[in-house]
Image: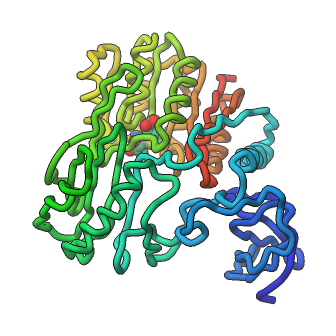
Amino acid sequence: MDEFTSRIEKIGYGGEGICYNEGKICFVKYCLPGEMVAIQKLSSKADYDIGQIKTILEKSEKRIVPKCPYYMHCGGCDFQHTSYQNELELKKQIMRNQLIKLGNNINFNIVASEKEYFYRNKIRLFPGKQKLGFKKEQTNSVIEIDNCEIANKLINISIPILSKFVFSQNIDKYLKYLEIRSKNNQLLINLFTNKKLNLSVNFLQDNLKTNFGLFQTINNKTEHIYGIQNIETNDNGLKFCISPNSFVQINDIVAQKLYNKVIETVKGNNIINCYSGAGFLSALLCLNGAQKVYGLELGINEHNDAEKLKKANNITNLINIQGDCALELPKVVKNADFIILDPPRKGCDNKVCNVINNSKAKQIIYISCNHATFARDVKRLNNYKLSNIELYDMFPRTCNFEIFSILQKI
Ligand SMILES: C[S@@+](CC[C@H](N)C(=O)[O-])C[C@H]1O[C@@H](n2cnc3c(N)ncnc32)[C@H](O)[C@@H]1O
């Protein structure tokens, strides 16, 4: 049967509603627990189906009208159809279900984001037919947009201007995508193209009424074309330079709260900060009582930004090492009282977990934006016991959140 009616029983790991059709599990996006829904089956696998809402027959009282006109089309957000308060509850449920699978019933809180909307400091847009837009989930079709409810204000001002810039100069034909980063009233625009273009910046100078930098990236090589080379900020007393390609947390206020939590947990120790990005947390740790910090980071852009940050702030108790944590951690692990892990979504290499299991570190702080790989790695870190968890809502209106956790040596 390609259509059926069912009640949504609970929330799935990716924020989808879970229901059953003749005993088989079906995942349906944009539904809320308790709702009775007429469902169109989209695809069928051996042990689950994917469906989409045809009609909502009984609505949850927690359903609201989404703010964004592209919601359910662009695929970027998952929870705009419910109140922010309920979204936080759903995120807690997702984490609780993951912990139950781990055999752990630890209590935890979620720290809300002050901004539900307009918080993202970076987005990636693709050329559509006439405008820039987001790629519809798991497809190559582009949903053209004029604004994005979760990107920050300056990014929103720049979206229509950049659409005009790209399409009036025929850049779209050679453009794979572009990235816009904005912090502290500055903008970095990076065009990822498949050939070198001669870009005229007059239109951008006339219309973007802010400090901006334009870059072009071809085959992973980024060239500065015009304007500022970095975003410069002065956060928490730290002079900080961000280049266009380095990783920086996308929600400034929540990132700051998360960093404060780490600082208060590890105070006064020797710390190895694995997957350290552009080095903001390493620098804050150094200036807040850490004896010595090692920052281990694979990306050369992030490592270079971290070195600039160290120099600009006269930090002397920080050693930034560029390389793969799986190779670099064994060389320095003997120095650690605390190890911080903040890996990308795929989690830690098994070698990293093995090295930590055999280390003398008293505590591990594991920060994760993916509860599935987090749960896998907590199992692998079997000489440590999960003792604390706090969620930080770094990504409002999407199903993602950041996990802060402490693991104690057994
Ligand atoms: C989630 S980010 C965390 C960055 C940083 N802790 C922060 O708060 O900004 C993960 C970082 O890990 C880096 N990375 C990815 N794979 C790595 C590896 N195998 N070894 C070291 N760093 C890696 C990425 O370049 C990225 O900067």
User: 116 or 279, which lies in front?
Assistant: 116
User: 165 or 16, which lies in front?
Assistant: 165
Judge from the rendering whether residue 270 lies leftward or rightward of residue 362; answer left or right. Answer: left
Judge from the rendering whether residue 236 lies leftward or rightward of residue 37; answer left or right. Answer: left
408 versus 403 height, above or below: above
Count up the numbered dots: 0
Indicate the quadrant where residue 301 lies: top left
How far across and how far down the image is residue 67, in percent?
Answer: 60, 60
How far across and how far down the image is residue 10, in percent?
Answer: 82, 59
Q: Is residue 400 visible?
A: yes
Residue lying at 64% horizontally and 58% vertically, measured from the top left: 80
330 versus 28 height, above or below: above
Q: Quadrant of ligand 1?
A: top left
User: 12 or 226, which lies in front?
Assistant: 226
Instruction: Please say which color scheme the image uses.
Output: rainbow
Quadrant showing the C terminus: top right
Residue lying at 41% horizontally and 69% vertically, measured from the top left: 133
Q: Is residue 326 visible?
A: no
Residue lying at 62% horizontally and 44% vertically, measured from the top left: 374
Residue lying at the far bottom of the rendered structure: 1
Residue lying at 68% horizontally and 82% vertically, measured from the top left: 42
How far across and how far down the image is residue 259, in percent?
Answer: 51, 27
How far across and how far down the image is residue 341, in percent?
Answer: 51, 34
Judge from the rendering whether residue 389 lies leftward or rightward of residue 247; answer left or right. Answer: right
Quadrant showing the N terminus: bottom right
141 versus 245 height, above or below: below
Indicate the quadrant where residue 57 lies: bottom right
